[in-house]
Amino acid sequence: MDFLKALNQIKTALPEGADTSQIDALSTALQPYQGLDPVAAREAIANQATRAASDAQYQQLQTERDNYQAQLKQFQDGNAQLSKELAATRGLAAAGVRPQYEELLLPRVTGSIELAEDGTPQTPEGFWDGLKTKYPDMFHAEDGAGTGAAPGATTADDSPRTVQATNGMVTGLDPSDVLNGSIALKL
């Protein structure tokens, strides 16, 4: 429906000499809306109301996404720390750390481990040898010739038990005790 056209029809239908100033003012006020479809305008107003709801829902989804990303970052950081601690524990065990010193060395070793791009833990070159050199009492000896402790230090649990062979025969021993060094044979 064209409002200007309707106003012109009303203006022409008025008797001659009638005051048309109000119709002219209304025509001027309606000039910017000429050609506007009222049905489309109502739909646009309705869409604007649903747009606010859509924007609120979109904002809520963005907030949830940000929360999930923060949680994912926390999980990734925790996983990285656990990977470092696992690598440190494995490295200490492979280096022959004495069990009573493992907890003491674990934070130092964990702090020295870096994660590569693929997430694998990496220790600096020569790290384990340097650690053994700096703290020799904390590690078992690698050559099996001693306990790894400083000279003069004694540890009751680590000294091998000596057994005597009678007529070249040793009986009542577990072969694994002989192999792991907890029993020394005296011939």
Image (tube, helix red, strand yellow):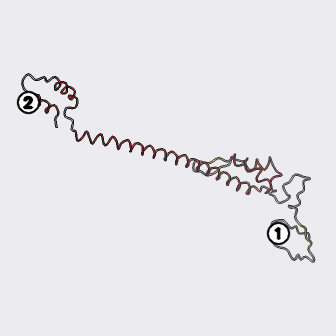
Q: Mark 2: which amino acid? A: Ala
**Residue occupying image coordinates x 86% and y 67%:** 183
Q: Position of residue 142 (x, y in %)?
A: 80, 57
Which residue, given by chain and number where applicable, does mark 1 sit on? 177
Give the crowd class for mark 1: few <14, some 14-19, many >=20 residues within 10 Å: few
Q: Is 10 placed left or right of 167 in the picture?
A: left
Which of the numbered marks, if any, corresponds to residue 13? 2
Q: Position of residue 78 (x, y in %)?
A: 62, 50
- Point out the image quarter for the N terminus: top left
- Image quadrant of residue 29? top left
**Residue occupying image coordinates x 46% and y 45%:** 60
- Of residues 158 and 132, the one drawn nearer to the viewer in this rendering: 158
Q: Secondary structure at mark 2?
A: helix
Which of the numbered marks, if any, corresponds to residue 81? none
**Residue occupying image coordinates x 66% and y 51%:** 84
- Image quadrant of residue 4? top left
Instruction: Count the labels in the image.
Output: 2
- Of residues 124 and 49, the one drawn nearer to the viewer in this rendering: 49
Residue 122, placed above or below residue 52: below
C-alpha distance separating marks 1 and 2: 123 Å
- Of residues 59 and 68, the one drawn nearer to the viewer in this rendering: 59
Q: Is 111 placed left or right of 15 in the picture?
A: right
